[in-house]
Amino acid sequence: MLYREAGDFKTSYAADSQTFPIKFDRWRYWVVLAVAWLVIPFFINDYWANAILVPFLIYAIAAIGLNILTGYCGQVSLGTGGFMAVGAYSVYKLMTSFPDVSILIHVVLAGFITAAVGAAFGLPSLRIKGFYLAVATLAAQFFLVWLFNKVPWFYNYSASGQISAPERFIGNIAVTGAETTPWAQYLICLFFVTLCALLARNLTRGSLGRQWMAIRDMDIAAEIIGVDPLKAKLTAFAVSSFFIGIAGALFFAVYLGAVEVGEAFGIQKSFLVLFMCIIGGLGSIFGSFAGAAFLVLLPVALKVLGVDILGWPSSTVAHLQLVAVGGLIMFFLIKEPHGLAQLWRVAKEKLRMWPFPY
Amino acid sequence: MKDTVAPYTTADGRQIGDVLMDMRGITLRFGGVEAIKDISFDIREGEIRAIIGPNGAGKSSMLNVISGFYNPQDGEVWFRGAKRPPMKPYQVARQGIARTFQNIALFDGMSVLDNIMTGRLTHMKSGLLAQAVWKGRAEREEVENRAVVERIIDFLEIQAIRKTPVGRLPYGLKKRVELARALAAEPKLLLLDEPMAGMNVEEKEDMSRFILDVNDEFGTTIALIEHDMGVVMDLSDRVVVMDYGRKIGDGTPSEVRNNQEVIDAYLGVAHD
Amino acid sequence: MSADFLYGVEVVINGLMSGVLYALVALGFVLIFKASGIFNYAQGVMALFAALTLVGVMEGQVPFSHIINATFGTDIHHFGWHVPALLAIALTLVVMIAFAWMVHTFVFKHLVGQEPIILFMATIGLAYFLEGIGDLMWGSDIKTLDIGIPQGGSMWVENISVHLGGEDFYGFFIDKLDITASIVAAILVIGLIVFAQYTKQGRAMRAVADDHQAALSVGISLNFIWILVWSLAGMVALVAGVMWGAKSGVQFSLSLIALKALPVLMLGGFTSIPGAIVGGLIIGVGEKLFEFMIGPMVGGATENWFAYVLALIFLVFRPQGLFGERIIERV
């Protein structure tokens, strides 16, 4: 009797367009939120925070961002790593230039800076499409990484060329720097994930989201119904980069603490986030979470299986991971282009009909 | 053959008003090929205006000129009493011109409801921030526009497929959804590019009924291209006939039917 | 002539020579793209994989030795023989053709008719897969590849050019390896063009590029053509992998160099063979000159991005590329 829409009548259009139209889904959503906010912080330890939860939350933000651009607006970008670097270096410059301002504000500002950079690199999208654009975004990737590597102003002329996050507090709780506790790391990331997921959901369910999807499905028809293609694509680039910038800022300041740009934000990162979107499901916010979780857990699982149980060398397991990820990408593109989110949806559809499938 | 007529009343008592759209001396070239040669005609408020002609006559090009997809090399487009500067298609859409396509151009990844809601875009003004917050302005706007869309869904009798992804629909229903999307814009002028192409007799009857009802109930001005002569003659108030990019006839269906040049074009008299 | 100018000329010559290799790899892209609509991101990794395989075969490495050793507790690494370079190249070519068959049969046959961007993303997945397989088979340590191509500056070029300048000019420094590479690449480029224009298979390939349906109706086997173009791409990858591998060792960055062919294509147009050649030369010369003149002012290493940014700017003004066919959109 749990998973039913029968009897759950909608009496207003607002109720019909809510995020989770089925009562059981709404209920489960609140349970997940409550566990994430009220239970996990008390049980989290260093391993869980650093190996799984914090990277999962940060990649989820990045994947939501890329999914808006690629999944909703249909513009494939291979510049995610570069845009994450913009977020990271923005937050670093802000933190060191204005030490008295709250880090929360810095992270949001880093998002806005990345949005501006992303929109600038999105300008060619009006003229070029498809994989032409995908390759053009490689220009952003390589150029930005080079820029942060070669211009000393960005890393405050430090001898190593690295940037490292100074200690910052919210209230009197350290959220960056060496003293940070796992639960503080986790909670600040959770805060931004919750915020970003909500924003992304709101932006994709209304007229803006429909403009993006119209551009994705058929750009000429979109223009004929009144979508200004330049404006729609640029907002998609800007909004997407806003999320990716926040992810980059958190990845540097909260998760790693110190980064070297080529290593942390190289082209591999662009692909990783793109793969999260493909495996999770293009055009689905839930899919962004699913994809991020999957690709954060896969290496952990492979390591446990390969290194700890089978006793293989860790480099071999790392190579095996490349094979697995590449193979999965091809598998999903062939068998289920809508990713894990679609598998989940099909399962729910069956459940809704159960036990009378017709 | 007359180029313009005064406001008039049709046989079934509908009031045909002032000139809504006036095409003056339109010429369109692709490279060296003239697709449209110096064509003038007008569309009056409340009218159903048909553009007919053999294949390759330039009918679709003409519709593309009206909807801003092509800008003509010569000639003027007047809409609602003002000369229209060269425009992009989305600007034309915002002026209140909506259209359907010969080969259906729906958004396959979206549900029927969302497809029709895209037709309301030109009426939805809330900005990025309002939508990010959702509660308040954006939600109110969504609900108001949803109400308009639901009326159109009822009108076109597609309630049952509201949440179906468009890609899964059969051809005839897709055509109807595309009409719904165009209607959702509440256009001043509705352009239909072969609304009945590829339909069986029953579907054609349905579609004809909808076109007449749209014109009747909402008072929407309609310009359509159609191959089925019977349908054109029954539906339209006035007909423009094109052949090889030229206009060879213009008038009521009965006038056009008796025009010798039109008969020649359709029966295939050799050109000199 | 002043020494500065002559050094500039040296840069241009070196740029032209690396440009020929770019052109060759770009040609591999054009062939696959024309025949199947696939924009093959994995081309770079294919070059890496080919070079790894060549080294492995030459040195008699046991494939997958790490996994075998870890699983069975053995300690085998080498068969203990050395294969001569030419035979090893032939064997590697066989591997690349087998790879072409597998790629088509297991992946792209199932994606026929998909949108180009989906195919493109699939090739990114393929790139990951192949990189992992290459590392698993042969190990990921940096390897030197020596198939007997002479290396080092050419004294002959230096001696005849030294008289061009004054006291402070010591003659052009041009690596013998680069000379060999550009000659081999030029021969292959010409060979590919001749193949595509004048042989039966080449004509069939172009027919498929023009119209799948029509090609089918005159009895051309699409499967055969697709495996053929993937094999050609494998051959191109092998040559590029050998040349770049001999120059700077066989390692991951080799696949990034080969990726330079992407901006070359954007410049030249995806469907144009002359475009690939001219684009390759422009990128080769452009990035060397830019690094020579602007590089020192901004900290160097501009070769990483120059080609992409040039292509990006260029595309904004001419989306179809230098020689590509104009894109006409229809409603």
Image: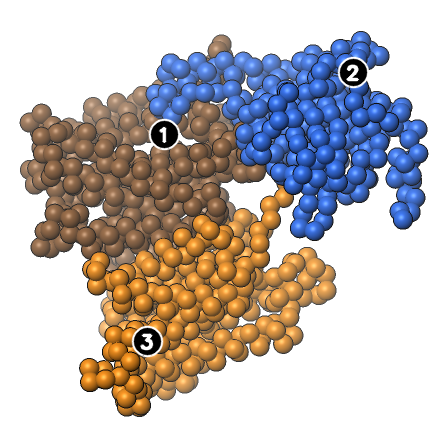
- What chain does mark 2 sit on? B
Would residue C158 be seen by someone viewing this image from the given angle? no
In the image, taking residue C197 as reference, residue A328 lies left or right, namely left
- In the rendering, which numbered label is found on residue B6? 2
- The residue positioned 12% from the left and 29% from the top of the image is A101
What is the display colour for chain C? orange
Q: CA distance from mark 1 to mark 2?
A: 54 Å
Q: Quadrant where the C terminus of chain C lies?
A: top right
Q: CA distance from mark 3 to mark 1?
A: 54 Å
Q: Quadrant of residue A280?
A: top left
Q: Specify the label residue A298 is tagged with.
A: none
Q: Is residue C193 above or below residue A304?
A: below
Which amino acid does the dot numbered 3 rest on?
Val
Q: Position of residue B130 (x, y in %)?
A: 37, 20
The answer to whether mark 3 and mark 1 are in CB contact below 8 A is no
Q: Secondary structure at mark 3?
A: helix
Q: Colour of chain A?
A: brown
The Cα atoms of the two marked residues, 3 and 2, are separated by 77 Å
Residue under label 1: A200
Disc 3: which residue: C9
Residue A70 image point, x, y percent: 42, 41
- On the image, the x and y values in percent for residue C47 come to 39, 69
Q: Residue at x 55, y 74 (%)?
A: C193
